[in-house]
Amino acid sequence: MIVDWLIQAGLVALYLFLAVVIGLLFMGIARKVTARVQNRVGPPVYQNFLDVGKLLAKKTNIKHNWIFDFAPLFALAGVLLALAYLPMGGYKMLSGEGDLILLLYIMAIPALGFALGAGASANPNAGVGVMRALMLMLSYEMPFLLVLLALMIFYNTASLSTLLEKQMSFAWGIVALPISALAADLALQGMMMEKPFDIPIAPHEIASGPLVEFGGKYLGMLMLYSAGSIVLETTLFVDLFLGGGVVLNPAHYGIIAYVVNYLVWFVFIFIVWMIAVLINAVFPRFRIEQAFKFYWKWPTVIAILGLIQAYIMSVFMGVVP
Amino acid sequence: MDALTLFGIFILLPLVGALLSYFGRKYAPIIALIFVAITGIFLYVWYGNFGSYTVDIGVKLNLTFDITTWFFMLMINTVIFSSLLFAVSADLKNAGGFSTLMLLGFTGANGVLLSRDFLSLYLFWELMSWSVYVLILRTSGEYARRYLLFGVLSAYFIIMGIGIIYYYTGSFLYEDALSGVIPYYAWAWILVFLILGFGVKMAIIPLHVWAPYAYSSEQPFVSFLSGGLSKLGTFGIYMSMYSIAGVGILDSFGTFRGVSLLGYPFALLGAITAFVGTILAIFQDDIRKLLAYSSIGQLGYVMVGLGLGTSLALGGALFHAFNHAFFKSLLFLGAGAVIYRTGKYKISEMGGLGYRMPFTFLFVLFAIFGLAGIPLTSGFISKWMLYEAAIEKKFVIIAPLMLIASVGAFLYSYRILYGIFLGGLKEEHKKVKEAPAPMLAAMFILMLPLLIFSIVPGWILGWINDVLTNTGLKPIDYTQFTYYSSIGGANMATFWIAFMVLFFVAVAIFIMKRARVVNQYDNYFAGEAPSSVALHAAHNYYKPLKDTWAPMLKYSVDRAYEKFSKFFVDGFYEIKKIYTGNPQDYAAYLGIAFLIFLIIGWWLL
Amino acid sequence: MNENPLPSVIPDKEWKKIQRMLSKRSLWMIHFCTGCGAMEMPPVMTSRYDMERFGIIPMATPRQADLMLVTGYVATKTLKRIVRVYEQMQDPKYVIAFGSCPINGGIYWDSYNIIKRLDKYIPVDLYIAGCMPRPEAVMDAFLKLMKDIDEGKANGWMRYRKYYDQYKRNQMRIFKRWDE
Amino acid sequence: MKAEDIFKDLELKFENLKVKGNTLPRYKAEVQPDKLEEAIIKFKSNGFNHFVALSCIDWIKDEKFELVYHLFSYEEKEDVFLSIFLPRNEPKYKTLRHLFPQIETYEREIHEMFGVEFEGNDRLGEFILEDWDNMPPMRKDFDTVKYGKEKYESVPLINEGGEKE
């Protein structure tokens, strides 16, 4: 029993490490793509690895008080925990042990820990930044929760692993609930704080908001957190709507299935990430009221339509995947 | 254990304690503490043997000590124990009177939980409600009057319910209500009256107006009122819906996807309460009002669970009531400790107290995790059960309201944390000391169950299962560490192990390099001088949100009541003008009246 | 201000070389434009010259930055802000001074308000001559700085630590109060 | 109302300034310090409601400071310069910020740069210069080169010889 437990732990560790590496790679690709959109050469794709290396190797690190340390610790631990609960490339890590609502609240742990650390830096910019971040969270959570509800009602399950199986057997989320997928993608733009919605970390207005007092190893760990959260949010979208990239059934093909699924999953999250980056490259930044009004108007209407569609299909038309 | 010992321990002992502690003056809370501890010990000892007895004190009281009563008594006893432990060092004025009234309230609460006939229920309900009124009176008459209005309203609703039952069955016993004599439509009236009567105590939306005012009195009392006594409302609704009426009666109103048509509107009302309570809590600047609206919001969740009526929903409601008893009283005690040390109520006036009062900050932080439903505390499990219950039955109005309300809970939670404990430490708070030891002990007692039941949810789910089966409902399936619903489940053991391991990984990366501590003035203010004035961004914290919500915030139930009452006051004022007091007017009135009658008489002929 | 004990896993020499390579390839510039040279930065950032290809991006706060550009004349009022921002930056940090004004006061050689030589107050790793150097000169400066960092010559921050009291004495000769 | 007519009402001697390339009429008049306020009020109520600038000229030879109040009228498109002369050794004048709020800023600058006292303006004192410890710098008798050399050249270079000074 201990042996396969260790193998499981080893695999989870490998998947988490790969997730963070992919996250940093995606940040590098995003900077390259944005540069190309702006007709610039742009940094090398591995630039973010150098940035994180430089930050972690900084000589002096400034900290304000013991609550200040909460930010990097809770942020990194929380995002790794959330990634552990998310099936990546069909490999169901801990997602059998917890369900979508648990994952939703685990994603709140790093946000709250990061907000605590930022608040403890006694800098008014940080306080305003966190206020904006929480308001943005309230705004994009409205359509996102409606979308999750539509999925749970339609597939009649809250556990991600069974959701993957049902998507494989019945139809992908994007095929069954296209309207909800659109609302989810709009909500994703706010969740990943990409350009029209990077209000909380606005460098020009509030000196990069909550990050104002973080430098050196603190900023390095927070960069790992943001890398992990990129993979987390894109994988969440892929798992909910694109069947988690599961193409070959692991039961029949064994290891090859896992590798192929991993590649397909990688391509899917890359596509989702590119949509977000291309929107990011061309949009100015909204004010927080505009973002709130936007999210509680159009994406919420779309999400409600998706919910109604799911409700009708599952209750009246009796479609049971 | 027979009738008299049961009655003696849970009712007479606190009464004697109330009497004795009045003369204790400064040491009154300690005396009261001893009496509450005794009842606590007996509660622990008598876990096994339940039974129902009748006591004859002039009028026959029907008392039953079963698992439901035990479960609710556990909450109320712990909460009052920690409130009194807090009051020991809170040097309240006239502490003797305070502890007497607290013990009277405690007696009333015990009586309500023990009683199985409407007479004793009403007797103890009035005793508890009266003692709460006088306790609020200690702070301000105006708040107490508002509470009294709603207290009396709730008493009348309960009497109406009891009256109808007595009219049909002729007896006050709970069991007799089910004797089939009461017709179908009468049950609707009985349940509506009883639920609204008990709902006032749980501050459901239309009847919540008293809560923000009542919660602004002394913090130890408020933590008992909001943490303990609001559970009596839950107990009342739970008993009246599922023990007195029973599932059969409820389903006789027709079921909508397995949920009785009577329960669904109350569940909807609960969801609206959760949403409105949370949104209002976000904009409050006074810490007590913010916690009051947040308490209304959380009790809205409990109301949803009670309304839905499936075993998972009821289990979630009971568990959430249990959690709410602990994290809400912990929050009020934390706020009380801060108010005791700084003497300020406004969040924007405080700031940076977390550096001076680290333990209070940690306790409040843990309570906030419980409130917001972070999986590190048991707060998450109860919310999870309520969500699963709503999603299981595909309720597409209740579930989104609850989910958005929980996200709203993050907003006002951070407002408390940032406004009071983080941000810049003001000059006058430089020498604020940590809260005294009894206060910290009280808060520690309240924090324990939140942590324990998050690691091992099995124990409390066991108790909840006994309560459900005791009232004849299907149990929920769970094991020592995991809990399931029909559409999902979660295992807290793997969660905690994974969290510990990954937290260790983060710490490993973190301690590679040491960090230099700088004070709060060595900060980046765009190159400007680190001024001695602490820049704290907590004033009017969610202003953009308030601007976007402004059109909706215009309507408020408070103002509706005020306009309603003003309408009557002006009306009566007009009538009063008639009695001018000098005889000529009266003579004139008589003449006019005579004339009018003359004309009518002439016209009729 | 003591040196942090570095992990002994990698021999000291290699580790310092890796650290220098890392800090060379990702210089984060504090977005604090002190004088008339700020106008030279947009062309350097945008598509024509694009400093981001060397990993240099403007950062909002000194805590996150490790390269400070003093672009143009430095009045006593600005010097106080520059020193404060410089001290809030975290080691290893580098300073590049643009134009002739930080070198010898430039066209303000006779002004009562402009300091004549920046090097006396904060350690400057690199000067760029010219009364506002063109973007090509700025790019060349970045490359020169990266080469200096690699060879370990750009150690302004060590000099600031070593001669901290001399720097402080010079600074206090210019402005009377520090905390205002 | 035309500037000439206002000048006639105030019996002020004015001269028409000829400036190459500037076709707008410009008038300059010298006013007694005590009568300046009501002159400005008169101009302000007759269309000259744009206060352009308050500048100070240091006539070091005849020991005088000249304060020039520059007004402009949008209706008539005319500039008016009202100037008063103050003794150079201890220049003192009352504040006119109640007429135009921006006068306060000009007065603060002139106080710092020339040392002119404006009673009633409570915000005089340190304004643009930082930690200034010398006479007002814009006066003609202030020698900037000597001050620059004495203050900045005297600061020693960082001695990196290793031995402390």
Image (cartoon, coloured by chain):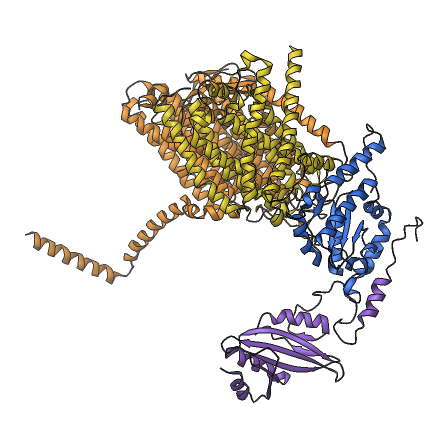
Residue in front for this viewpoint, B298 or A99 = A99
**Residue A15 appears at what percent x and percent y?**
63, 23
| Residue that protrudes farthest toward the left in the picture | B605
Residue in front for this viewpoint, D126 or D160 = D160
From the viewer's perspective, tell me whether residue C84 is left or right of residue A296.
Answer: right
Quadrant in the picture for residue A273 = top right
**Chain drawn purple, letter?**
D
From the viewer's perspective, tell me whether residue D122 is left or right of residue B244.
Answer: right
From the viewer's perspective, tell me whether residue B395 is left or right of residue C7.
Answer: left
**Residue A317 appears at what percent x and percent y?**
34, 23
| Residue that protrudes farthest toward the top in the picture | A1
**Residue A50 appears at what percent x and percent y?**
71, 35
Q: Residue at x 51, y 75 (%)?
A: D74
**Residue B20 appears at what percent x and percent y?**
56, 32
Q: Residue at x 38, y 45 (%)?
A: B561
**Chain drawn orange, letter?**
B
Residue in front for this viewpoint, C122 or C33 = C33
Q: In this view, does A91 lie above or below A136?
A: above
Instruction: Look at chain A in the picture and name its colour.
Output: yellow
Q: Can residue A201 be seen?
A: yes
Q: Which residue is drawn at 68% across and 80% down?
A: D66
Q: Can residue B75 be seen?
A: no
Q: In this view, does C77 lie above or below B289?
A: below
**Chain drawn blue, letter?**
C
